[in-house]
Image: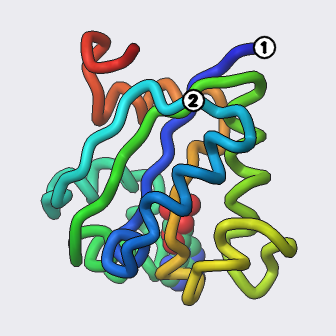
Amino acid sequence: MVQQTLSIIKPDGTQRNLVGKIVSRFEEAGLRVVAMKRKLMSDHEAKGFYAVHKDRPFFGELVQMMTSGPVVIMVLEGENAVLRNRELMGATDPSKAAAGTIRKDFAKSIGENTVHGSDSPENARTEIQYFFSATEIG
Ligand code: CMP
């Protein structure tokens, strides 16, 4: 089933100039970049995006990290894109991520874990709409 998912290259990824390497992994795995923007997320945008985590102890740190530099936000499209992207990313905690995954190869810590990806098709739809209008995707 062809799906779309949201991917974010986090500030620790853009700061280390890893955008091309990360996008190549998606493309080589058969995912297509159908929308892409680079921006500095505002405090308000980061808090809204991660609202489900607002009661977690790491929420402040998470918002601080996501607004600490530019991010690259993408819509990826392809067969089983949500799961495929999560496989390519690896586990949230890079010390638990499988060999060959983006987080195993590039992430510094659970907080600076280089990429975000939607965790379900439902959340993918919500997250895509949070950052992109329909006319920006194609
Ligand atoms: P992400 O996939 O973007 O979704 C939520 C983020 O919260 C997650 O990646 C991590 O970067 C971050 N996160 C999860 N657990 C912790 C933690 N214990 N400490 C700091 N950040 C965390």
Give the x, y percent position of residue 108.
55, 88
Which quarter of the image is occupied by the N terminus? Answer: top right
Q: Against 27, is 91 above or below?
A: below
Give the amino acid type for the residue marked by disc 2 in the picture.
Arg
Residue 123 visible in this rendered orientation of the protein: no
Which mark lies nearer to you, 1 or 2?
A: 2
Give the x, y percent position of residue 32.
57, 29
Q: Mark 1: few, some, or many residues within 10 Å (few <14, many ≥20)?
A: few
Q: Which residue is mark 1?
A: 1
Between residue 19 and residue 128, name the one nearer to us: 19
Between residue 58 and residue 13, name the one nearer to us: 13
The residues tagged by marks 1 and 2 sit, at their Cα atoms, a distance apart of: 14 Å
Q: Does label 1 or label 2 sit earlier along the sequence?
A: 1
Q: Does the CB distance between marks 1 and 2 fall below 8 Å? A: no
User: Residue at point 45% right, 80% down?
Assistant: 58
Q: Mark 2: few, some, or many residues within 10 Å (few <14, many ≥20)?
A: some
Q: Against 51, is 125 above or below?
A: above
User: Residue at point 65% right, 44% down?
Assistant: 119
Which mark is drawn over residue 32?
2
- Left or right: 52, with 63 as reference point: right
Which mark is drawn over residue 39?
none
- For the image, the number of numbered tags is 2
User: Residue at point 39% right, 80% down?
Assistant: 16
- Left or right: 65, with 105 as reference point: left
Give the amino acid type for the residue marked by disc 1 in the picture.
Met
Secondary structure, mark 1, is loop
Give the x, y percent position of residue 45.
21, 51
- Left or right: 64, with 111 as reference point: left
User: Residue at point 29% right, 35% down?
Assistant: 131
